[in-house]
Image: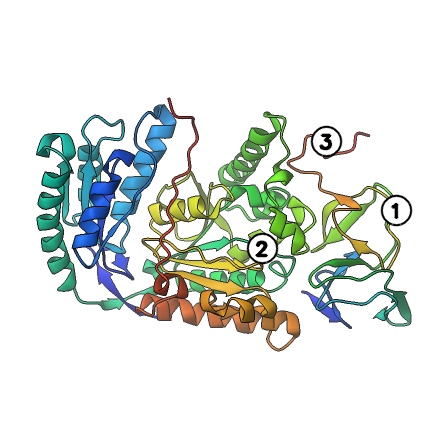
Amino acid sequence: MNFLGYKRPDGKMGVRNHVVILPSVACSNEVCNAIARKVKGTISIPHQHGCAQLAFDAEQTARTLIGVGKNPNVAAVLVIGLGCEVVNSTMIASKIAESGKPVKNLVIQEVGGSPKTIKEGVKIAKEMVSFASRLKREKSKPNSLILGVECGGSDACSGLSANPALGVTSDLLIKEGGTIILSETTESIGAEHILAKRAINKKVREKILEIVMRTEMRALNLGLDIGKANPAPGNYEGGITTLEEKSLGCVMKGGTSKVMEVLEYSELPTQKGLVLMDTPGHDAESMTGLIAGGTQIIAFTTGRGNPLGSPIAPVIKIASNSYLYSKMKDNMDINAGEIVTGNKTVQEIGEKIFREVFRVANGKLTKSEIWGHQEFAINRIGPSF
Amino acid sequence: MSKVIENLILSHSKDNVATAKSPIKSGTSLTISKGKKIIVKEEIPFAHKIALRGIPRDGAVIKYGERIGRAIREIKPGELVHIHNVVGERGRSKGRKKG
Protein backbone atom coordinates (compact mmCIF):
# COMPACT_ATOMS: atom_id res chain seq x y z
CA MET A 1 0.00 0.00 0.00
CA ASN A 2 1.41 3.42 -0.95
CA PHE A 3 0.76 6.79 0.68
CA LEU A 4 1.27 10.44 -0.15
CA GLY A 5 4.13 11.96 1.79
CA TYR A 6 6.50 14.93 1.84
CA LYS A 7 9.86 14.06 0.35
CA ARG A 8 12.76 15.55 2.33
CA PRO A 9 16.20 16.36 0.88
CA ASP A 10 17.66 13.22 2.54
CA GLY A 11 15.13 11.04 0.70
CA LYS A 12 12.99 10.32 3.79
CA MET A 13 9.22 10.73 3.58
CA GLY A 14 7.21 12.82 6.04
CA VAL A 15 3.53 12.32 6.82
CA ARG A 16 3.30 15.82 8.34
CA ASN A 17 4.94 19.10 7.41
CA HIS A 18 5.88 20.85 10.64
CA VAL A 19 7.96 23.98 11.10
CA VAL A 20 9.58 23.52 14.51
CA ILE A 21 10.86 26.22 16.85
CA LEU A 22 13.26 24.19 18.99
CA PRO A 23 14.88 25.37 22.23
CA SER A 24 18.26 23.74 22.86
CA VAL A 25 17.87 24.58 26.54
CA ALA A 26 15.02 25.32 28.95
CA CYS A 27 16.18 28.97 29.11
CA SER A 28 14.97 29.49 25.49
CA ASN A 29 11.50 28.00 26.02
CA GLU A 30 9.52 31.21 26.33
CA VAL A 31 11.22 32.89 23.36
CA CYS A 32 10.32 29.80 21.26
CA ASN A 33 6.73 29.85 22.57
CA ALA A 34 6.40 33.57 21.73
CA ILE A 35 7.57 33.01 18.14
CA ALA A 36 5.21 30.04 17.69
CA ARG A 37 2.29 32.13 19.01
CA LYS A 38 2.98 34.81 16.42
CA VAL A 39 3.55 32.60 13.36
CA LYS A 40 0.74 30.30 12.31
CA GLY A 41 1.94 26.89 11.19
CA THR A 42 4.85 26.63 13.62
CA ILE A 43 5.19 24.54 16.76
CA SER A 44 7.38 25.25 19.74
CA ILE A 45 8.66 22.24 21.70
CA PRO A 46 9.54 23.46 25.19
CA HIS A 47 11.42 21.10 27.51
CA GLN A 48 13.25 21.24 30.85
CA HIS A 49 16.73 20.22 29.72
CA GLY A 50 19.91 21.25 27.91
CA CYS A 51 22.00 22.55 30.81
CA ALA A 52 23.72 21.35 33.98
CA GLN A 53 23.82 17.87 32.47
CA LEU A 54 26.92 15.68 32.35
CA ALA A 55 28.43 13.31 29.77
CA PHE A 56 26.03 10.56 28.62
CA ASP A 57 23.01 12.43 29.97
CA ALA A 58 23.82 15.63 28.00
CA GLU A 59 24.65 13.47 25.00
CA GLN A 60 21.23 11.77 25.17
CA THR A 61 19.43 15.14 25.32
CA ALA A 62 21.46 16.40 22.32
CA ARG A 63 20.79 13.19 20.36
CA THR A 64 17.08 13.56 21.08
CA LEU A 65 16.87 17.20 19.96
CA ILE A 66 18.86 16.45 16.79
CA GLY A 67 16.65 13.44 16.05
CA VAL A 68 13.47 15.47 16.54
CA GLY A 69 14.75 18.12 14.10
CA LYS A 70 15.76 15.47 11.56
CA ASN A 71 12.42 13.65 11.77
CA PRO A 72 10.92 13.48 8.25
CA ASN A 73 7.65 14.99 9.53
CA VAL A 74 9.60 18.23 10.03
CA ALA A 75 10.04 20.59 7.03
CA ALA A 76 12.24 23.23 8.65
CA VAL A 77 13.71 24.04 12.07
CA LEU A 78 14.65 27.19 13.94
CA VAL A 79 16.90 26.28 16.88
CA ILE A 80 17.12 28.82 19.67
CA GLY A 81 19.82 28.71 22.32
CA LEU A 82 20.72 30.96 25.21
CA GLY A 83 24.47 30.93 24.58
CA CYS A 84 26.04 29.44 27.71
CA GLU A 85 24.23 26.06 27.76
CA VAL A 86 25.79 22.58 27.70
CA VAL A 87 23.63 21.39 24.79
CA ASN A 88 24.89 24.01 22.35
CA SER A 89 22.26 25.27 19.92
CA THR A 90 24.69 25.94 17.08
CA MET A 91 25.89 22.33 17.23
CA ILE A 92 22.27 21.07 17.32
CA ALA A 93 21.36 23.23 14.32
CA SER A 94 24.38 22.13 12.25
CA LYS A 95 23.67 18.43 12.97
CA ILE A 96 20.00 18.82 11.92
CA ALA A 97 21.14 20.69 8.80
CA GLU A 98 23.02 17.55 7.68
CA SER A 99 19.60 16.27 6.60
CA GLY A 100 19.51 19.04 3.98
CA LYS A 101 16.34 20.72 5.31
CA PRO A 102 16.28 24.48 6.06
CA VAL A 103 17.69 25.09 9.56
CA LYS A 104 18.46 28.40 11.25
CA ASN A 105 19.93 29.19 14.64
CA LEU A 106 19.56 32.17 16.98
CA VAL A 107 21.40 32.68 20.27
CA ILE A 108 19.61 34.94 22.75
CA GLN A 109 22.81 36.28 24.36
CA GLU A 110 24.24 37.16 20.92
CA VAL A 111 21.08 38.71 19.47
CA GLY A 112 20.62 40.77 22.63
CA GLY A 113 17.70 39.51 24.69
CA SER A 114 14.17 38.16 24.39
CA PRO A 115 12.30 40.81 22.34
CA LYS A 116 15.07 41.12 19.75
CA THR A 117 15.35 37.34 19.39
CA ILE A 118 11.58 36.99 19.10
CA LYS A 119 11.52 39.69 16.41
CA GLU A 120 14.37 38.03 14.49
CA GLY A 121 12.84 34.56 15.00
CA VAL A 122 9.42 35.63 13.72
CA LYS A 123 11.03 36.81 10.45
CA ILE A 124 12.81 33.47 9.98
CA ALA A 125 9.75 31.43 11.00
CA LYS A 126 7.58 33.32 8.52
CA GLU A 127 9.97 32.40 5.68
CA MET A 128 10.05 28.76 6.82
CA VAL A 129 6.26 28.48 6.95
CA SER A 130 5.99 30.00 3.49
CA PHE A 131 8.54 27.45 2.21
CA ALA A 132 6.81 24.48 3.88
CA SER A 133 3.37 25.50 2.61
CA ARG A 134 4.59 25.22 -0.98
CA LEU A 135 5.74 21.59 -0.61
CA LYS A 136 3.42 19.00 -2.15
CA ARG A 137 2.69 15.44 -1.10
CA GLU A 138 3.97 12.78 -3.49
CA LYS A 139 3.64 9.03 -3.90
CA SER A 140 5.64 7.18 -1.25
CA LYS A 141 6.38 3.51 -0.70
CA PRO A 142 5.36 1.80 2.56
CA ASN A 143 9.00 0.80 3.17
CA SER A 144 9.70 4.46 4.02
CA LEU A 145 7.39 4.24 7.06
CA ILE A 146 8.55 3.80 10.64
CA LEU A 147 5.65 3.02 12.96
CA GLY A 148 6.25 3.28 16.70
CA VAL A 149 4.13 0.92 18.79
CA GLU A 150 3.31 2.10 22.28
CA CYS A 151 0.92 1.29 25.11
CA GLY A 152 -0.19 3.36 28.07
CA GLY A 153 -2.79 2.91 30.75
CA SER A 154 -3.07 -0.78 29.94
CA ASP A 155 -5.68 -3.11 31.40
CA ALA A 156 -5.90 -6.88 31.41
CA CYS A 157 -7.72 -6.72 28.04
CA SER A 158 -4.77 -4.98 26.37
CA GLY A 159 -2.85 -8.23 25.98
CA LEU A 160 -5.94 -10.04 24.67
CA SER A 161 -7.29 -7.48 22.17
CA ALA A 162 -5.51 -4.22 21.26
CA ASN A 163 -1.90 -5.43 21.61
CA PRO A 164 -2.18 -8.66 19.57
CA ALA A 165 -4.22 -6.73 16.97
CA LEU A 166 -1.46 -4.12 16.75
CA GLY A 167 0.95 -7.06 16.42
CA VAL A 168 -0.96 -8.09 13.28
CA THR A 169 -0.56 -4.50 11.98
CA SER A 170 3.19 -4.69 12.72
CA ASP A 171 3.55 -7.94 10.77
CA LEU A 172 1.60 -6.45 7.83
CA LEU A 173 3.74 -3.30 7.68
CA ILE A 174 6.94 -5.33 7.90
CA LYS A 175 5.69 -7.50 5.02
CA GLU A 176 5.38 -4.25 3.02
CA GLY A 177 9.01 -3.41 3.81
CA GLY A 178 8.35 -0.98 6.66
CA THR A 179 9.87 -0.66 10.12
CA ILE A 180 8.32 -1.13 13.55
CA ILE A 181 9.92 0.24 16.72
CA LEU A 182 8.83 -1.55 19.88
CA SER A 183 9.89 0.38 22.98
CA GLU A 184 9.32 0.53 26.78
CA THR A 185 11.98 -1.79 28.15
CA THR A 186 10.40 -1.83 31.62
CA GLU A 187 7.41 -3.51 30.03
CA SER A 188 9.58 -6.24 28.54
CA ILE A 189 10.65 -7.45 32.00
CA GLY A 190 9.27 -10.97 32.27
CA ALA A 191 8.76 -11.27 28.51
CA GLU A 192 12.33 -10.76 27.32
CA HIS A 193 12.77 -14.49 26.64
CA ILE A 194 10.08 -14.24 23.94
CA LEU A 195 11.86 -11.35 22.21
CA ALA A 196 15.31 -12.93 22.70
CA LYS A 197 14.11 -16.12 21.01
CA ARG A 198 13.23 -14.08 17.93
CA ALA A 199 16.57 -12.18 17.75
CA ILE A 200 18.14 -12.24 14.30
CA ASN A 201 21.58 -13.09 15.75
CA LYS A 202 23.50 -13.65 18.97
CA LYS A 203 24.53 -10.00 19.29
CA VAL A 204 20.91 -8.80 19.14
CA ARG A 205 19.82 -11.54 21.55
CA GLU A 206 22.44 -10.51 24.09
CA LYS A 207 21.57 -6.84 23.70
CA ILE A 208 17.86 -7.55 24.36
CA LEU A 209 18.74 -9.38 27.57
CA GLU A 210 21.21 -6.65 28.52
CA ILE A 211 18.76 -3.71 28.25
CA VAL A 212 16.10 -5.59 30.21
CA MET A 213 18.53 -6.61 32.96
CA ARG A 214 19.96 -3.08 33.07
CA THR A 215 16.47 -1.64 33.61
CA GLU A 216 15.53 -4.19 36.26
CA MET A 217 18.82 -3.75 38.13
CA ARG A 218 18.50 0.06 38.09
CA ALA A 219 15.50 -0.31 40.42
CA LEU A 220 16.82 -3.25 42.42
CA ASN A 221 20.16 -1.51 43.09
CA LEU A 222 18.20 1.31 44.69
CA GLY A 223 16.40 -1.29 46.81
CA LEU A 224 13.10 -0.35 45.14
CA ASP A 225 10.31 -2.43 43.64
CA ILE A 226 9.38 -1.49 40.06
CA GLY A 227 5.87 -2.69 40.89
CA LYS A 228 5.27 0.45 42.99
CA ALA A 229 5.24 2.48 39.74
CA ASN A 230 4.85 -0.09 36.99
CA PRO A 231 2.29 -1.62 36.84
CA ALA A 232 0.68 1.72 37.76
CA PRO A 233 -2.29 1.91 40.16
CA GLY A 234 -4.70 2.08 37.20
CA ASN A 235 -3.17 -1.02 35.65
CA TYR A 236 -3.94 -2.96 38.86
CA GLU A 237 -7.50 -1.59 38.88
CA GLY A 238 -7.78 -2.73 35.26
CA GLY A 239 -7.02 -6.30 36.27
CA ILE A 240 -3.28 -6.49 35.63
CA THR A 241 -1.73 -8.31 38.57
CA THR A 242 2.04 -8.33 37.93
CA LEU A 243 4.73 -6.67 35.82
CA GLU A 244 5.24 -10.00 34.00
CA GLU A 245 1.58 -10.10 33.00
CA LYS A 246 1.76 -6.52 31.73
CA SER A 247 5.00 -7.22 29.82
CA LEU A 248 3.73 -10.41 28.17
CA GLY A 249 0.80 -8.41 26.80
CA CYS A 250 2.97 -5.41 25.93
CA VAL A 251 5.49 -7.17 23.67
CA MET A 252 2.67 -8.52 21.46
CA LYS A 253 2.45 -5.06 19.84
CA GLY A 254 5.61 -5.85 17.87
CA GLY A 255 4.04 -8.84 16.13
CA THR A 256 5.89 -12.06 15.35
CA SER A 257 8.82 -10.92 13.19
CA LYS A 258 12.52 -11.41 13.90
CA VAL A 259 14.12 -8.70 16.04
CA MET A 260 16.66 -7.03 13.73
CA GLU A 261 18.31 -4.50 16.01
CA VAL A 262 18.29 -2.95 19.49
CA LEU A 263 18.57 0.84 19.67
CA GLU A 264 19.53 3.10 22.53
CA TYR A 265 17.06 5.88 23.39
CA SER A 266 16.55 8.27 20.42
CA GLU A 267 18.85 6.35 18.06
CA LEU A 268 17.93 5.95 14.38
CA PRO A 269 17.28 2.42 13.11
CA THR A 270 19.79 1.10 10.57
CA GLN A 271 17.62 -1.94 9.77
CA LYS A 272 14.12 -2.43 8.38
CA GLY A 273 11.65 -4.75 10.08
CA LEU A 274 11.12 -5.07 13.83
CA VAL A 275 13.58 -3.13 15.98
CA LEU A 276 13.57 -2.46 19.72
CA MET A 277 14.39 0.84 21.40
CA ASP A 278 15.44 1.08 25.04
CA THR A 279 12.95 3.56 26.48
CA PRO A 280 11.23 3.72 29.88
CA GLY A 281 7.57 2.89 30.50
CA HIS A 282 6.88 6.65 30.85
CA ASP A 283 4.81 7.18 27.69
CA ALA A 284 5.72 10.79 26.88
CA GLU A 285 9.43 9.97 27.31
CA SER A 286 9.08 6.81 25.28
CA MET A 287 7.26 8.56 22.43
CA THR A 288 9.86 11.34 22.42
CA GLY A 289 12.56 8.67 21.96
CA LEU A 290 10.52 7.17 19.12
CA ILE A 291 10.13 10.45 17.21
CA ALA A 292 13.83 11.24 17.70
CA GLY A 293 14.48 7.83 16.13
CA GLY A 294 12.61 8.91 12.99
CA THR A 295 9.16 7.45 13.76
CA GLN A 296 6.55 9.18 11.58
CA ILE A 297 3.43 7.62 13.15
CA ILE A 298 2.75 6.10 16.58
CA ALA A 299 0.05 3.49 17.25
CA PHE A 300 -0.86 3.56 20.94
CA THR A 301 -3.04 1.01 22.74
CA THR A 302 -4.81 1.75 26.01
CA GLY A 303 -7.25 0.02 28.32
CA ARG A 304 -7.75 2.69 30.97
CA GLY A 305 -7.81 5.61 28.51
CA ASN A 306 -4.91 7.86 27.61
CA PRO A 307 -5.07 11.16 25.67
CA LEU A 308 -1.30 11.69 25.04
CA GLY A 309 -0.05 12.93 21.69
CA SER A 310 3.23 14.08 20.20
CA PRO A 311 4.31 17.40 18.67
CA ILE A 312 5.85 15.58 15.68
CA ALA A 313 4.02 12.30 15.02
CA PRO A 314 0.30 11.64 14.74
CA VAL A 315 -0.68 9.20 17.50
CA ILE A 316 -3.44 6.66 16.75
CA LYS A 317 -5.28 5.60 19.91
CA ILE A 318 -6.62 2.04 20.11
CA ALA A 319 -9.00 1.11 22.92
CA SER A 320 -8.62 -2.41 24.33
CA ASN A 321 -12.23 -2.61 25.55
CA SER A 322 -15.60 -1.20 24.50
CA TYR A 323 -16.37 0.38 27.91
CA LEU A 324 -13.37 2.66 27.43
CA TYR A 325 -14.12 3.28 23.76
CA SER A 326 -17.60 4.57 24.49
CA LYS A 327 -16.53 6.49 27.60
CA MET A 328 -13.54 8.27 25.99
CA LYS A 329 -14.60 8.20 22.35
CA ASP A 330 -13.27 11.75 21.89
CA ASN A 331 -9.75 10.44 22.47
CA MET A 332 -9.99 7.03 20.79
CA ASP A 333 -9.44 6.35 17.08
CA ILE A 334 -10.11 2.59 16.96
CA ASN A 335 -12.03 0.16 19.17
CA ALA A 336 -10.26 -3.18 19.65
CA GLY A 337 -12.84 -3.99 22.35
CA GLU A 338 -14.88 -5.70 19.67
CA ILE A 339 -12.38 -8.56 19.98
CA VAL A 340 -13.33 -8.98 23.65
CA THR A 341 -17.05 -8.94 22.85
CA GLY A 342 -16.44 -11.50 20.09
CA ASN A 343 -17.75 -9.26 17.27
CA LYS A 344 -14.36 -9.00 15.55
CA THR A 345 -11.21 -11.11 15.37
CA VAL A 346 -7.68 -10.01 16.27
CA GLN A 347 -6.82 -10.29 12.56
CA GLU A 348 -9.74 -8.05 11.51
CA ILE A 349 -8.84 -5.28 13.96
CA GLY A 350 -5.14 -5.60 13.03
CA GLU A 351 -6.04 -5.02 9.38
CA LYS A 352 -8.27 -2.10 10.38
CA ILE A 353 -5.39 -0.44 12.27
CA PHE A 354 -3.14 -1.06 9.25
CA ARG A 355 -5.59 0.77 6.96
CA GLU A 356 -5.88 3.58 9.52
CA VAL A 357 -2.06 3.97 9.58
CA PHE A 358 -2.13 4.70 5.84
CA ARG A 359 -5.11 7.06 6.11
CA VAL A 360 -3.23 8.98 8.79
CA ALA A 361 -0.06 8.88 6.65
CA ASN A 362 -2.10 10.52 3.87
CA GLY A 363 -3.09 13.35 6.18
CA LYS A 364 -6.13 12.24 8.21
CA LEU A 365 -5.87 13.86 11.63
CA THR A 366 -5.91 11.63 14.70
CA LYS A 367 -7.90 12.53 17.82
CA SER A 368 -4.70 13.46 19.67
CA GLU A 369 -3.85 15.93 16.87
CA ILE A 370 -7.36 17.39 16.79
CA TRP A 371 -7.20 18.12 20.53
CA GLY A 372 -3.71 19.58 20.18
CA HIS A 373 -1.94 17.01 22.34
CA GLN A 374 1.80 17.68 21.99
CA GLU A 375 3.32 16.03 25.05
CA PHE A 376 7.10 15.96 24.91
CA ALA A 377 9.48 14.64 27.58
CA ILE A 378 13.15 13.80 27.20
CA ASN A 379 14.31 10.82 29.24
CA ARG A 380 17.06 11.75 31.74
CA ILE A 381 19.70 9.23 32.73
CA GLY A 382 21.62 11.44 35.12
CA PRO A 383 20.84 14.09 37.73
CA SER A 384 21.15 17.85 37.17
CA PHE A 385 24.33 19.43 38.55
CA MET B 1 -4.61 -18.41 20.09
CA SER B 2 -7.05 -17.08 22.66
CA LYS B 3 -10.32 -18.90 23.16
CA VAL B 4 -13.66 -17.75 24.56
CA ILE B 5 -15.36 -20.03 27.11
CA GLU B 6 -18.69 -18.81 28.41
CA ASN B 7 -17.93 -15.35 29.75
CA LEU B 8 -14.17 -15.87 29.92
CA ILE B 9 -11.20 -15.43 27.61
CA LEU B 10 -8.55 -18.12 27.88
CA SER B 11 -5.33 -16.85 26.30
CA HIS B 12 -3.51 -20.21 26.13
CA SER B 13 -4.35 -23.88 26.71
CA LYS B 14 -1.74 -24.11 29.50
CA ASP B 15 -3.30 -21.25 31.50
CA ASN B 16 -4.72 -21.83 34.97
CA VAL B 17 -6.52 -18.46 34.95
CA ALA B 18 -8.95 -16.82 32.51
CA THR B 19 -10.11 -13.20 32.02
CA ALA B 20 -13.72 -12.06 32.58
CA LYS B 21 -15.33 -10.52 29.48
CA SER B 22 -17.82 -8.75 31.74
CA PRO B 23 -18.41 -8.78 35.52
CA ILE B 24 -19.32 -12.25 36.81
CA LYS B 25 -21.50 -12.71 39.89
CA SER B 26 -20.57 -14.94 42.80
CA GLY B 27 -22.31 -18.33 42.59
CA THR B 28 -22.39 -18.41 38.76
CA SER B 29 -21.69 -21.87 37.33
CA LEU B 30 -19.27 -21.87 34.39
CA THR B 31 -18.56 -24.84 32.11
CA ILE B 32 -14.84 -24.50 31.40
CA SER B 33 -14.42 -27.71 29.40
CA LYS B 34 -16.46 -30.76 28.49
CA GLY B 35 -18.16 -31.90 31.67
CA LYS B 36 -16.01 -29.64 33.84
CA LYS B 37 -17.75 -26.91 35.80
CA ILE B 38 -16.55 -24.36 38.28
CA ILE B 39 -18.63 -22.29 40.66
CA VAL B 40 -17.56 -18.65 40.84
CA LYS B 41 -16.60 -18.04 44.48
CA GLU B 42 -16.71 -14.24 44.51
CA GLU B 43 -17.56 -11.34 42.18
CA ILE B 44 -15.07 -11.15 39.29
CA PRO B 45 -14.84 -7.57 37.94
CA PHE B 46 -14.51 -6.91 34.21
CA ALA B 47 -11.05 -7.84 32.83
CA HIS B 48 -10.02 -9.51 36.09
CA LYS B 49 -8.86 -13.11 36.36
CA ILE B 50 -10.51 -16.17 37.78
CA ALA B 51 -8.75 -19.42 38.76
CA LEU B 52 -9.79 -22.33 36.52
CA ARG B 53 -7.87 -24.84 38.60
CA GLY B 54 -6.58 -24.94 42.14
CA ILE B 55 -3.19 -23.24 42.54
CA PRO B 56 -1.16 -24.25 45.62
CA ARG B 57 0.69 -21.72 47.74
CA ASP B 58 3.93 -20.78 45.90
CA GLY B 59 2.49 -22.33 42.72
CA ALA B 60 2.87 -20.61 39.35
CA VAL B 61 0.05 -18.50 37.95
CA ILE B 62 -0.04 -19.06 34.18
CA LYS B 63 -1.52 -16.65 31.59
CA TYR B 64 -0.52 -16.43 27.90
CA GLY B 65 1.02 -19.86 28.54
CA GLU B 66 3.70 -18.12 30.64
CA ARG B 67 4.40 -17.63 34.34
CA ILE B 68 3.01 -14.24 35.43
CA GLY B 69 3.59 -14.63 39.14
CA ARG B 70 3.48 -16.78 42.27
CA ALA B 71 0.50 -17.55 44.51
CA ILE B 72 1.12 -16.28 48.03
CA ARG B 73 -1.62 -18.53 49.38
CA GLU B 74 -3.67 -21.41 48.11
CA ILE B 75 -6.11 -20.31 45.39
CA LYS B 76 -9.24 -22.43 44.83
CA PRO B 77 -10.99 -22.84 41.45
CA GLY B 78 -13.51 -20.02 40.95
CA GLU B 79 -11.63 -17.49 43.11
CA LEU B 80 -10.52 -14.07 41.97
CA VAL B 81 -6.79 -14.07 41.09
CA HIS B 82 -5.21 -10.68 41.73
CA ILE B 83 -2.78 -8.74 43.91
CA HIS B 84 -4.31 -10.09 47.16
CA ASN B 85 -3.20 -13.65 46.38
CA VAL B 86 -0.46 -13.31 43.72
CA VAL B 87 2.91 -11.53 43.59
CA GLY B 88 5.13 -10.84 40.63
CA GLU B 89 8.68 -12.11 40.77
CA ARG B 90 10.41 -9.58 38.54
CA GLY B 91 11.59 -6.09 39.33
CA ARG B 92 11.07 -6.79 43.02
CA SER B 93 13.80 -7.13 45.61
CA LYS B 94 11.80 -9.88 47.34
CA GLY B 95 10.37 -11.34 44.13
CA ARG B 96 11.78 -14.80 43.69
CA LYS B 97 11.31 -17.21 46.54
CA LYS B 98 14.56 -18.87 47.51
CA GLY B 99 14.95 -22.60 47.03
Q: Quadrant of the N terminus of chain A?
A: bottom left
Q: Which residue is mark 3?
A: B94
Specify few, some or many for label 1: CA neighbours under 10 Å numbering under 14, 14-19, or 20 or more: some
Q: Which residue is mark 1?
A: B74
Q: Position of residue A188 (x, y in %)?
A: 57, 45
Q: CA distance from mark 2 to mark 1?
A: 28 Å
Q: Position of residue A376 (x, y in %)?
A: 37, 47
As drawn, is A381 to the left or to the right of B91? left
Q: Residue at x 68, y 46 (%)?
A: A242
Q: Which residue is mark 2?
A: A154
Q: Quadrant of the C terminus of chain A?
A: top left
Q: Chain of mark 3?
A: B
* Quarter occupied by residue B23: bottom right
The one nearer the camera, A304 or A132, is: A304
| Amino acid residing under circle 2 | Ser
| Amino acid residing under circle 1 | Glu
Q: Position of residue B44 (x, y in %)?
A: 77, 61
